[in-house]
Amino acid sequence: MVQTNSLNSSPPSTGQFDLEAYLATQRQRVEAALDRALALRYPETLYEAMRYSLLAGGKRLRPILCLASCELVGGSGEMAMPTACALEMIHTMSLIHDDLPAMDNDDYRRGRLTNHKVYGDDVAILAGDALLSYAFEHVATYTQGAPPEQVLKVVAGLGKAVGGEGLVGGQIVDLASEGKPDVTLETLNYIHNHKTAALLEISVTSGAMLAGASDGKLENLRQYAQRIGLAFQIVDDILDITSTPETLGKSVGKDVAAQKVTYPSLWGLEESRRQAEQLIEAAKESLAEFGDLRQPLVAIADYIVARTY
Ligand code: GRG
């Protein structure tokens, strides 16, 4: 499979803000930091497997959101970078585990063979486990310039986003819903608010927490993140129907093949697009009080609904 989901895809520019240049710069910063964060060492097989998936490209949306929200409330990118890297480690762990035969059983991810196809199920499980625990170690050890109580708030938020109130909770309801044609919109929203939106929420709020944002600002950012989170998943469901493996870097049509209930299966494609666009408009309204500095987050919201991979 050809890897096409790289830096040179062209998201739309929003007004005077050059989103394409912004994303390219932020992705380069994140790629370099991830590479530094996880050097190859003994036991090599484990670290090779961790680096194989962590450094396989991807949009780097979660770390970029974290850096943007930290800068939005007056913090620095340096202060947020260990958390940004940790978010990508957690996200990558979830992709490795999601692709396993016991879960979604996928052969391709980010334009290459999935982790377990290359290293075996045993190593893939352990590589995910090691990425997950290292994410927390990395934040606690390397965050500089933020008071310890703010770092602690981020660590607690990350834990919540991963566990039963986050990724794991969403995944288990998703697995239990497989093959059931009567899954309701309420259950579908539960699944994706936990599987997808929870990590996007802490991606946005963690950067602002590190910079000491007020409760009011954190609440606005939380609302923004929840709205882009659900829109992101609706677009994901749409792309599973309308895109190709070459563009997405992973298998397509799996939801239809597995007769999974998705937003398009409940609403149809056109209504799903409309709902995603409405959520993005509402997300941008949540940023009203931030002034001009909100531009990156506004542009990223537009990108989420316009994205092609
Ligand atoms: C083992 C603690 C533990 C948790 C794992 C497997 C699992 C529980 C949860 C599944 C979470 C999951 C894979 C949700 C899907 C989220 C999603 C839409 C991923 C695609 O994200 P993109 O498009 O991917 O940002 P890239 O490759 O661009 O980073």
Image: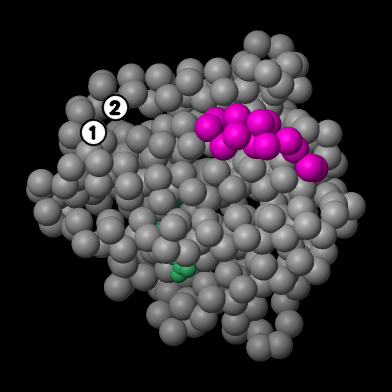
Q: Residue 109 or 79: which is nearer the viewer?
A: 79
Q: Residue 264 shows which numbered tag?
A: 1
Residue drawn at point x = 55 percent, y = 18 percent:
285
List the single residue furthest toward the left: 181
Report if the beta carbon of the residue with label 2 is closer than 8 angstroms to ligand 1: no
List the single residue furthest toward the front: 215
> In the rendered view of the protein, which quadrant contains the N terminus?
bottom left
Q: Mark 2 to mark 1: distance in Å?
A: 6 Å
Q: Residue 87 or 109: which is nearer the viewer?
A: 87
Looking at the image, is 293 positioned above or below residue 43?
above
Q: Residue 44 shows which numbered tag?
A: none
Quadrant in the picture for residue 24: top right
Residue drawn at point x = 68 percent, y = 55 percent:
154
Q: Which residue is mark 2?
A: 272
List the single residue furthest toward the bottom: 43
Secondary element under disc 2, as helix, strand or loop, is helix
Secondary element under disc 1, as helix, strand or loop, is helix
One can see residue 26 in this view: no
Q: Position of residue 26 (x, y in %)?
A: 73, 40
Residue drawn at point x = 45 percent, y = 27 percent:
305
Q: Is residue 213 magenta?
A: yes
Looking at the image, is 208 positioned above or below residue 283?
below
Disc nearer the start of the sequence (2/1): 1
Q: Position of residue 109 (x, y in %)?
A: 44, 57
Tell which quarter ligand 1 is in. bottom left
Q: Position of residue 179 (x, y in %)?
A: 13, 56
**In contact (CB < 8 Å): disc 2 and disc 1:** yes
Q: Give the class, few, some or many, for how many residues have Cα within 10 Å of label 2's Cα (few <14, many ≥20).
A: many
Q: Main secondary structure of the magenta part?
A: helix
Type of residue at label 1?
A: Pro
Find the magenta span and give its range: 211-224
